[in-house]
Amino acid sequence: MKKTNAIILLAVGVLGVAVLTPKLMAADGTMPSCCGGAPTETVADTQAKPDLLATCPVSGDKLGEMGAPFTFTYKDQEVKLCCKNCKKDFDKDPAKYLKLIRAADKK
């Protein structure tokens, strides 16, 4: 009897995951990515120098493939990342990534 109940519970759980997963993915609109499909937000200064780079300087992913880029201002420079999770890496060595962004200005 216990084994039968365990099998039924397992089957219901698997069915629930199979039914809800596509709905949850469609509901939040995120796509799997290097950063786990993290939600994006925008915190940018309109007076900042624009970021013309078409890819995330941290991950190298094309901006916009995973939704709106995570945008913020760092020392009067607009910075666009593919997702909020890339900001942790940006904060470790901002000069490295600013160099990539500013190189795009010269092209």
Image (cartoon, rainbow, N blue to C red):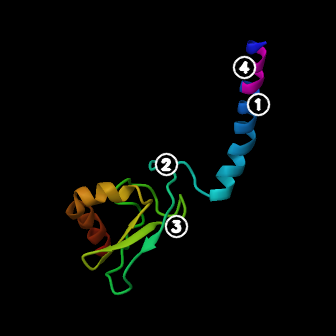
Q: Label 1 amino acid?
A: Val
Q: Are marks 3 and 2 in contact (CB under 8 Å)?
A: no
Q: Which residue is painted at 67% across and 57% down in the image?
A: 27
Between 44 and 17, the one nearer to me in the picture: 17
Q: Are marks 1 and 4 in contact (CB under 8 Å)?
A: no
The residue under label 1 is: 12
The residue under label 2 is: 36
Quadrant holding the C terminus = bottom left
Q: Which residue is painted at 41% across and 61% down in the image?
A: 55
- The vertical placement of 41 against 1, above or below, is below
Q: Quadrant location of residue 30? A: bottom right
Mark 1 vs mark 3: give the one in front: 1
How far separated are the C-alphas under marks 4 and 2? 32 Å
**Residue 6 left/right relative to 34:** right
How far separated are the C-alphas under marks 1 and 4? 10 Å
If you read the primary sequence from the N terminus, does the residue marked by circle 1 or circle 3 appear first?
A: 1
Q: Main secondary structure of the magenta part?
A: helix
If you read the primary sequence from the N terminus, does the residue marked by circle 4 or circle 3 appear first?
A: 4
Q: Which residue is painted at 24% across and 56% down in the image?
A: 92
In the drawing, what numbered circle is on residue 6? 4
How far separated are the C-alphas under marks 1 and 3? 36 Å
The residue under label 3 is: 68
Quadrant holding the N terminus = top right
